[in-house]
Image (spheres, rainbow, N blue to C red):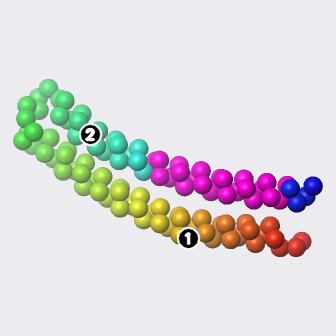
């Protein structure tokens, strides 16, 4: 009985870690989509007549630089979580499961 509860608990913990990683990646992609959408919003404004309008150029530059920064941050977080946190917590949970009480 207790063995199956421990195994199920171990599986659930790994599932929760995977969901957490997915949520972090999804949040980063949503932020990227919003930053890129700013360009389309400014392009659709009535008083922006061309792509050489200063407002369009400024928002486009800021959005691209912001998207680049968020992409690099997202890459860093993904490596950090996958390489360190996920591995560390998995080892910790497995060690707790096999350790005799």
Q: Quadrant of residue 91?
A: bottom right
Q: What residue is pinned by disc 1?
A: 84
Which image quarter is the C terminus in?
A: bottom right
The answer to whether 20 is drawn above or below residue 55 in the figure is below
Under circle 1, the secondary element is helix
Q: Position of residue 90 (x, y in %)?
A: 67, 66
Front label number (2 vs 1)? 1
- The residue that appears at 42% across and 50% down in the rendered structure is 28
**Residue density around tag 2, few if under 14, some if 14–19, many if 20 or more, within 10 Å:** some
Q: Quadrant of residue 8?
A: bottom right
Q: Main secondary structure of the magenta part?
A: helix
Under circle 2, the secondary element is helix
Q: Would you say residue 6 sits in the magenta stretch?
A: yes
Q: Position of residue 62 (x, y in %)?
A: 22, 50
- The residue that appears at 35% across and 61% down in the rendered structure is 72
Looking at the image, residue 23 sits to the left or right of residue 96; the answer is left
Nearer to us in this view, 91 or 43 = 91
Nearer to us in this view, 24 or 45 = 24
**Residue density around tag 1, few if under 14, some if 14–19, many if 20 or more, within 10 Å:** few
Chain part drawn in magenta: 5-27
Q: CA distance from mark 2 to mark 1?
A: 34 Å
Numbered label attached to residue 9 = none
| Count of marks placed on residues | 2
Return the residue found at the far right: 1
């Amino acid at each position: 009985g207790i063995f199956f509860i421990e195994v199920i608990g171990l599986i659930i913990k790994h599932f929760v870690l995977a969901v957490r990683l997915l949520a972090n990646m999804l949040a980063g992609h949503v932020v990227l989509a919003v930053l890129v959408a700013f360009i389309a919003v400014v392009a659709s404004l009535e008083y922006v007549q061309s792509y050489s309008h200063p407002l369009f150029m400024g928002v486009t530059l800021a959005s691209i630089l912001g998207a680049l920064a968020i992409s690099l941050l997202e890459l860093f977080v993904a490596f950090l979580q996958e390489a360190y946190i996920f591995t560390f917590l998995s080892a910790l949970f497995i060690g707790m499961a096999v350790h005799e009480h």
